[in-house]
């Protein structure tokens, strides 16, 4: 059961002054868009000044180094190295690149999967056309593979027995010798339930499948070691718990796979000698850059680096402890107020989202906004996502406002 003890790491509230949005509203929507730090603003202004002063020369004197530093920053969040990271403008683009590299396995050649997996994944004798995802995953994951049905891809969408999560047993029943890939979230975007990634990786590898994790709802909040967990492919971005705005995302591919995969969706940043400008040859860069496309957005990179700078200073462990404690407190307040919570009660199995069921969630969210409280809605729920910079008093204000807005007849 959620605790009513004070949230740990109250010392982190000293960072509130670095986020201008917090002085203007009770902001409880970090899982849609993290608040911007003043450090991001300063880094953006620096890029604009370089642009005005140097023009295109800024690429060689500053901006290529900035991109390398951003790869290092993203790698830090998942205990990887910067040379393993590919930058992307968004997760959809990163997924498209990966899908293009995996397309050969959908032709049904078992040897192709063995080659792509570097001989690490055991392969049977039948074709592997199947990709598995769940009904709780963000639509991007399913759409990526539905769009490849003409290539022979079969998408299986697992159902949730409780509307909160999908148990490992459901994956175990679905993953078979025809499964090439399981693509699912580290944290489900509506309910905030956290997936047992390590257990799922074991299931996949026992049966010769690869595991792709969409971690957008988790990166920067849940401590993650991608290699130790056995993840094969990992996508995420700066928008949410990295407090870095839109326009910057990244991809990590297990090193054993990096050398074997060859993306057919590509760009000049994926070339080994990109400044040779050779049109008649294609030699991929080594490491993560092999999966990059065109020119990254330098303003977006600067903003993203400002957000991660704050995280590096604090540490993800402390951020996780405080944020999960705030989630516990939010659940307890909602229970006391008679609101119906749709969330995992065990903080060890939850990310930063607490969903509260109402019949008219958009109306409730609009009412909260009018009262100065910013939350979000998804089908059937008001989605609240406090971050380390929120106070317990703000949680109480939000629940009190929601309690007034949602009549008994509108409480599902």
Image (cartoon, rainbow, N blue to C red):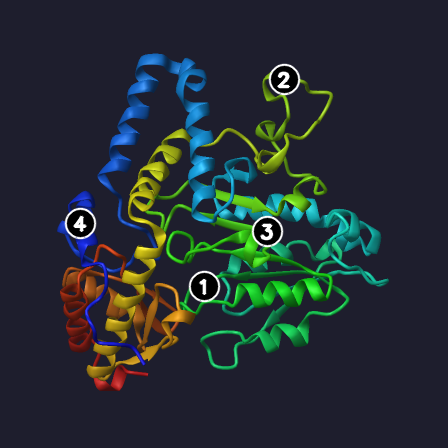
Q: Which residue is mark 3?
A: 233
Q: Alpha-carbon neighbours of circle 3 within 10 Å: few (<14), some, or many (≥20)?
A: many
Q: Quadrant of the N terminus?
A: bottom left
Q: Alpha-carbon neighbours of circle 4 within 10 Å: few (<14), some, or many (≥20)?
A: some
Earlier residue among tags 1 and 3: 1
* Proximity of marks 4 and 1: CB atoms separated by less than 8 Å: no
Q: Is residue 44 left or right of residue 209?
A: left
Q: Secondary structure at mark 4?
A: helix
* Proximity of marks 2 and 4: CB atoms separated by less than 8 Å: no
Q: Which residue is mark 4?
A: 16
Q: Nearer the viewer, mark 2 or mark 3?
A: 3
Q: Alpha-carbon neighbours of circle 2 within 10 Å: few (<14), some, or many (≥20)?
A: few
Query: What's the residue at 51%, 56% (across, down)?
Result: 214
Which residue is nearer to you in this view: 330 or 148? 330
Earlier residue among tags 2 and 3: 3
* Proximity of marks 1 and 2: CB atoms separated by less than 8 Å: no
Q: Secondary structure at mark 1?
A: loop
Q: Is residue 183 left or right of residue 77?
A: right
Q: Which mark is residue 277?
A: 2
Q: CA distance from mark 4 to mark 1?
A: 26 Å
Which residue is nearer to you in this view: 33 or 208? 208
Q: CA distance from mark 2 to mark 4?
A: 47 Å
Earlier residue among tags 4 and 1: 4
Residue 355 horizontal/vertical position (percent): 34, 71
């Amino acid at each position: 059961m959620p605790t009513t003890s004070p949230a740990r790491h109250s010392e982190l509230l000293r960072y509130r002054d670095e986020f201008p949005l917090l002085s203007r509203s009770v902001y409880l929507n970090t899982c849609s868009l993290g608040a911007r730090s003043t450090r991001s603003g300063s880094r953006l202004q620096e890029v604009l000044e370089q642009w005005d002063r140097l023009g295109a020369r800024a690429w060689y004197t500053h901006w290529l180094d900035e991109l390398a530093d951003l790869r290092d920053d993203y790698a830090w969040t998942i205990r990887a190295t910067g040379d393993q990271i590919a930058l992307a403008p968004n997760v959809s683009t990163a997924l498209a690149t990966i899908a293009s590299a995996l397309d050969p396995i959908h032709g049904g050649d078992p040897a192709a999967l063995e080659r792509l997996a570097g001989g690490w994944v055991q392969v049977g004798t039948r074709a592997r056309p199947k990709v598995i995802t769940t009904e709780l995953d963000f639509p991007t994951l399913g759409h990526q593979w539905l769009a490849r049905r003409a290539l022979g891809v079969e998408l299986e969408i697992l159902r949730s027995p409780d509307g909160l999560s999908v148990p490992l047993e459901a994956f175990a029943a679905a993953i078979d010798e025809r499964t090439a890939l399981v693509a699912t979230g580290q944290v489900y975007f509506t309910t905030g339930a956290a997936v047992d990634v390590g257990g799922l990786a074991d299931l996949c590898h026992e049966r010769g499948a690869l595991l792709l994790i969409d971690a957008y709802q988790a990166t920067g909040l849940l401590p993650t070691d991608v290699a130790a967990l056995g993840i094969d492919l990992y996508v995420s971005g700066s928008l949410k718990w990295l407090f870095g705005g839109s326009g910057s995302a990244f991809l990590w591919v297990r090193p054993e796979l990096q050398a074997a995969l060859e993306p057919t969706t590509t760009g000049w940043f994926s070339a080994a000698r990109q400044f040779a400008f050779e049109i008649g040859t294609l030699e991929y860069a080594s490491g993560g850059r092999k999966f990059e496309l065109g020119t990254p957005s330098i303003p977006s990179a600067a903003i993203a680096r400002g957000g991660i700078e704050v995280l590096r200073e604090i540490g993800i462990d402390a951020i996780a402890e405080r944020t999960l404690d705030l989630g516990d407190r939010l659940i307890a307040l909602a229970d006391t107020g008679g609101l119906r919570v749709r969330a995992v009660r065990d903080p060890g199995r939850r990310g930063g989202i607490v969903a509260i069921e109402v019949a008219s969630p958009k109306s409730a969210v609009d009412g909260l906004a009018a009262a100065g409280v910013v939350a979000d809605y998804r089908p059937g729920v008001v989605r609240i996502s406090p971050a380390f910079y929120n106070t317990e008093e703000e949680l109480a204000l939000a629940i009190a406002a929601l309690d007034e807005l949602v009549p008994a007849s509108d409480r599902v």
